[in-house]
Amino acid sequence: METSNNNQTQTDQPLVSVNILSYNSMRYIEGCLDTALAQTYKNLEILVIITGSEDGSAEFIKQKYGRQKRVKIIEPGVNLWFSRGHNLGIKMCQGKYALVLNQDTVMEKDFVVKLARVMEQDQSLGSVSGKLLHYNFSFNSKTKILDSTGIEIFKTRRVIDRGQWEKDDHQYDADTEIFGASGAAAFYRRSALEAVKLPKRNSEFEYYDEDFIAYKEDIDLSWRLQLAGYRCKYIPEAILYHGRTVGRSWPNQLVRFIVNRKRQPRLYRKMAFKNHYLMMIKCELRTHFWHQFGFIFVRESLLLIYTLIFEPFQFAVVSMLYRELPEAWRKRKLIMANVKTDPQRIWKLFH
């Protein structure tokens, strides 16, 4: 088990696999890979999954990092999006732990060692999250604006990145049990991922749900890990910077919701809309759903009104949802058969 001494030899450290999905990443990838290679935790393998890039980043990665012993480059040749791309990396990695990273992330040099230490000390953890702050790539500078301190879920089934867009005034400096880790930088126990993977119809398996393609797949995986009895913890001492576009911190939540949604392309909003319902179909415990039905009903009714007024194009998703419903129900049966936790423990995570 890892001690607090950072001078521990590499052979004493369990292997950590860093999976980075690269798509047209020329603006970001150098900072991401350089900080991965500079980690004080040395027993790392770094898998770069290059998915259909057209901006010269694939050639740059191969030229600068192709001879690095710890870097493995995977080129499927097409854009696999988030779920399929990271699933490919997880299947090919060898580590006891898997750190799933967005390409627009920059790590402090002790990010991995601090997360790995916590995972080694507590075998009940399936995942951990560090403190994610915003990185301004326009000025190539770190900021004090929070990006995520973990996934937070509410009784209404609204899900947010905890603390997002707030200034970091040390209000999130306590180790905290959370619902899940943001997919921008999620540190998973590999055995936990194996415990919640879902069989596909072609005899293969998936960790992130590939029917989601992108958006909310990290929430879905977090929910499945919780149901299988794996906890998630937020570790504020582990710092990473993420280049997600910063939204204005509006005082009114409704205004913030509308403005930030308008900034998203329609395709992304449609995927998030569909995946929200697929996730609930798959992962809801009946006892939780009926006890919190009033909260859920009010929010879903308000979302329906909002959609009718501002996003009527979303109703095209209904046919997609209908087609994917049988597969979601098949997965639900598998997930429910794998529930190994006290429902009351998860109940406390719905805020």
Image (cartoon, grey):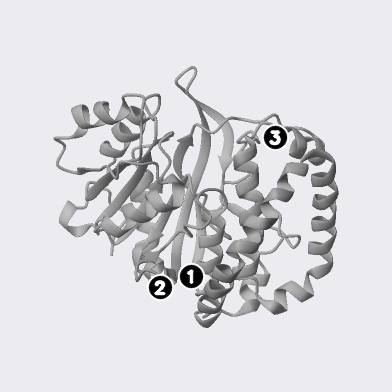
- Spot occupied by residue 23 in the image (x, y as percentages of width and height): 39, 35
- Spot occupied by residue 137 in the image (x, y as percentages of width and height): 47, 23
Disc 3 + disc 1, Cβ < 8 Å:
no
Which residue position is annotated with label 3? Answer: 260
Q: Amino acid at mark 2?
A: Ala
Which residue position is annotated with label 1? Answer: 230
The image quadrant that residue 28 belongs to is top left
Q: Amino acid at mark 1?
A: Tyr
Q: Secondary structure at mark 2?
A: helix
Q: Amino acid at mark 3?
A: Asn
Disc 1 + disc 2, Cβ < 8 Å:
yes
Locate residue 36 relative to residue 248 in the image: left or right. left
Distance of label 1 from label 2 (alpha carbons): 10 Å
Give the residue displayed 60% in from the left and 48% down from the top. Answer: 271
- Spot occupied by residue 32 in the image (x, y as percentages of width and height): 36, 34
Examine the rendering and report whether any part of residue 175 can be seen.
no
Examine the rendering and report whether any part of residue 155 can be seen.
yes
Is residue 218 positioned above or below 246 on the image?
below
Is residue 269 positioned above or below 219 on the image?
above
Quadrant location of the N terminus in the rendered image: bottom left
Among the two numbered marks 3 and 2 on one chain, the one whose residue lies closer to the N terminus: 2
Q: Secondary structure at mark 1?
A: loop
Among the two numbered marks 1 and 2 on one chain, the one whose residue lies closer to the N terminus: 2
Q: Which marked residue is nearer to the observer: mark 3 or mark 1?
A: 3
Give the residue displayed 56% in from the left and 48% down from the top. Answer: 215
Which residue position is annotated with label 2? Answer: 195
Q: Which marked residue is nearer to the observer: mark 1 or mark 2?
A: 2
Q: Nearer the viewer, residue 73 or 3?
A: 73
Is residue 336 positioned above or below 54 on the image?
below
Q: Secondary structure at mark 3?
A: helix
Disc 3 + disc 2, Cβ < 8 Å:
no
Is residue 52 positioned above or below 298 on the image?
above
